[in-house]
Amino acid sequence: MHIPDGFLSPQIIIITFAITIIFWIIAFKRVKGRLDERQVPLMGLLTALFFAAQMMNYPIVGGTTAHLLGGAALGIILGPFAGCISMTIILVLQAFLFGDGGLTALGANVLNMGIIGVFVPAFIVLAFNKITKGKGLLVWVFIGAFAGDVLAAIAAGAELGFSQPVFQYGLNVAVPAMAINHSVIGVIEGVVTAVLVGVLLKLRPDVLSKSSVLKSLPAVKAAQENTE
Amino acid sequence: MLNLSKKDKQMLAIGLTLAVIFVIVGVFIFAYSMETLDRQAEELGVQDSSTYQAPFPDYAILGFENEVGNILLGILSTLSIFGVTLGVAILLKKKRGSK
């Protein structure tokens, strides 16, 4: 889903960078001085893990491939602001070291994968946690991760569609193609994210106690009380 | 700077081993990449117009483009990302004693 240089119009480049820079400022302000010591190794680990996971390209439909994004897991487990910073680190290093995603498209790529792909799953899980009091959590994690991937793909398709004539396919072609193909990887993302959250809830609920998305869960609260 | 419990160290060991496995699987099994965007660009004849030359284009070491080189680069870059993120997280972390 990494958009290279030369695919976006100057207007879309400016708009996506402007939105992304606003989110970067808010994210750094929200996280600075608030990241718990227990989240530090987890943030490093999850960022490295999903950077590596993005190297696996799964065959999806019509001979195309897609890779996991990881934004859902980062947003749900670390909280969306720290998750946005983690995904930004991945995308910046991918662009500068490997030419994966263009430098002029960095704003768009962070907006799609580091903001939409992170905040959407986090808010879906947070909202349904409040309504259902944690019941069916992993189902909501799956739905959140799926929605995050598909909406990130739709955003990428829209940015390309609005970039006509630089990118000749309009919204009617770019958006459905991105959305349909990425709904397949969205299912895989949903399963992987649900498994990861499930394993952490079982084995290390204490490291989830500082996640703004999961801290209200009874198992996480109990683990937090035990460590204090 | 960073106090790691035994459980944290175990989590890091398991997680980083998993990351290395992802790199190896990515190089040997799921290496072929033709994303939707690549396919559309091919159909339209749109090309990457970047003037910036990345040091490791397509996740390969120039002149050493084989599985071993790709795995080495994959592992080193995964560890680098781990180190960079850890550094950023330490800078952002709560100061001791603060609420």
Image: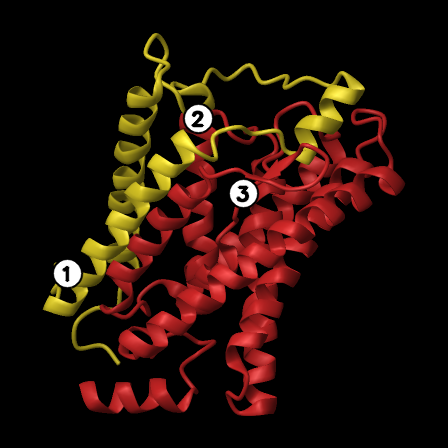
Chain colours: A red, B yellow
Expressed as whole percent of the image width and height from the top left, the position of residue A149 reads 62, 54
Amino acid under label 1?
Answer: Lys
Q: Nearer the viewer, mark 3 or mark 1?
A: 3
> Subunit of mark 1?
B
Chain under callout 3 = A
**Dot 2 and dot 1 within a common chain:** no
Residue positioned 31% across, 43% down in the render: B21
Dot 3 surroundings within 10 Å: few (below 14), some, or many (20 or more)? many
Front one among A12 and A91: A91
Q: Is residue B57 above or below residue B87?
A: above
Q: Tell me where residue A131 appears, x and y as whole percent.
A: 61, 90
Q: Quadrant of residue A121?
A: bottom right
Residue that mark 2 sits on: A98
Task: Name the kind of residue labelled 3 in the image.
Answer: His
At 30% across and 27% down in the image, what residue appears?
B73
Q: Is A65 on the left or on the right of A47, as rendered?
A: right
Q: Please tell me the numbered disc located at residue B9.
A: 1
* Between A6 and B44, the one nearer to me in the picture: B44
The relative height of residue A223 versus residue B82 in the rendered view (above or below) is below
Q: Secondary structure at mark 3?
A: loop
Residue A204 in sight in this render: no
Which chain contains the residue that carries disc 2? A
Where, by quadrant of the figure, is residue A156 drawn?
Answer: top right
B36 lies above or below A98: below
Callout 2 secondary element: helix
Q: Where does label 3 land, which residue?
A: A67
**Which disc, if any, is residue A142?**
none
The type of residue carrying mark 2 is: Phe
